[in-house]
Image (spheres, grey):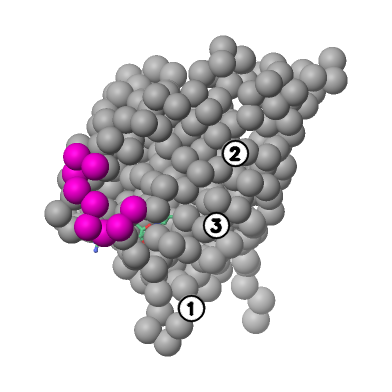
Amino acid sequence: MSTASARILDGKAVARSVRDEVRERAERLIARGVRPGLAVVLVGEDPASQVYVRNKDRAAQEAGFEVRTERLPATTGQEQLHAVVDALNADPAVHGILVQLPLPEGLDADAVVARLDPAKDVDGLTPTNVAALVTGREGLVPCTPAGCIELLDRGGVELKGARVVVVGRSMLVGKPFALLALARHATVTICHSRTRDLAGVCRDADVLVAAVGRPELVRGDWVKPGAAVLDVGINRRPEGGLVGDVAFEEARAVAGLITPVPGGVGPMTIAMLIRNTALAAARLHGVAWDELAPAAAQG
Ligand code: NAD
């Protein structure tokens, strides 16, 4: 028996092309005397954070950026951490600052994030950037939800008028994605752990985004035939390997388009971080982003 099968959106390939485009724009910025600079602040020894930071460093270097990692011991105090952020805020060679979360116990992450210069806040988490997203003003947008929008755009998914259901309401993914989809004229529903009839709400979605952190929560019969399904979840299987928030094989048989885990949304997060850093560098030096586009430079 043959079953219909969704097109798989290859996040690795899309991330590659975003990173290549950013590198080209960065080359044009560098030619104007501006080398994008990214500073990553890593406090403590969390093994997952070490891996993330290494990957971010590598991607930024590959894009031609100046990269600096401030490694601080887990015993770092709040005031000390603020002083590091203040110095990076003041440093003209630094255009993007990323404080790797979570911070060790005892440190107030909200206070650290609030201290970042919003123009350098490449994670888009400062109150100023959150407000910009809510009100539709120019700012810096969190990388994972921005990556989801980019994937949908490149996958040819129309958001205007579409029913979008987002499962998860975190400040990092669910809420900002919902706001970005709303800005694109989608009709948006945000679900969470207390949503009644979650499966029924999901079944209504033209675009279904799962950002929960529960392995294979979203089943195949929660998916509307032909829907686009974005799986943000990254869950470690006890036996090793990663699994998303969507039961991939089941959903794939019903959906029109689906992202795998790994290799879907994950690689987009770093690609968008690289883009945000180049964008921040351009803005801080009064250069229009469009001026750096390959087509504009050729014309
Ligand atoms: P979070 O824990 O901050 O938020 C999870 C959300 O899911 C909450 O709003 C909660 O209400 C909701 N939720 C929990 N249980 C639920 C249930 N049974 N039914 C419906 N909703 C439920 O997590 P987060 O930071 O938003 O991350 C979500 C997932 O995405 C995690 O697996 C995380 O590892 C992954 N993630 C991936 C990337 C990436 O680059 N791909 C980036 C960030 C997060």
Residue sitting farthest toward the bottom: 239
Q: Which residue is at a point 63% across and 46% down the rendered structure image?
A: 61
Residue pointed to by mark 3? 55
Residue pointed to by mark 2? 66
Residue sitting farthest toward the top: 286
Q: Which of the two discs, 1 and 3, sits closer to the camera?
A: 3
Instruction: Locate ligand 1 by image quadrant.
Output: bottom left
Estimate how packed mark 1 is, as few (under 14), some (14 to 19) or many (20 or more) residues with alpha carbons within 10 Å: few
Q: At label 1, which amino acid type do we have?
A: Gly
Residue 196 location (% of width, % of height)? 18, 55
Q: Is residue 230 above or below residue 98?
A: below
Q: Which residue is at a point 60% across and 53% down the rendered structure image?
A: 58
Specify the quadrant that holds the N terminus. Answer: bottom right
Q: Is residue 216 magenta?
A: no
Q: Is there any visible trace of residue 296 in the rendered image? A: yes
Magenta-colored span: 72-80
Residue 12 location (% of width, % of height)? 64, 56
Q: At label 2, which amino acid type do we have?
A: Glu
Secondary structure under tag 2 reads strand
Q: Which of the two discs, 2 and 3, sits closer to the camera?
A: 2
Q: Looking at the picture, tell me which residue is in the foreground, 87 or 144.
A: 87
Q: Looking at the picture, tell me which residue is in the foreground, 231 or 72.
A: 72
Label located before the other in sequence (1 or 3): 3
Q: At label 3, which amino acid type do we have?
A: Asn
Q: How many marks?
A: 3
* Callout 3: CB less than 8 Å from ligand 1: no
Residue pointed to by mark 1? 241
Q: Is residue 138 left or right of residue 168?
A: right
Q: Is there any visible trace of residue 224 in the rendered image? A: no
Estimate how packed mark 2 is, as few (under 14), some (14 to 19) or many (20 or more) residues with alpha carbons within 10 Å: some
Q: Which residue is at a point 53% across and 28% down the rendered structure image?
A: 93
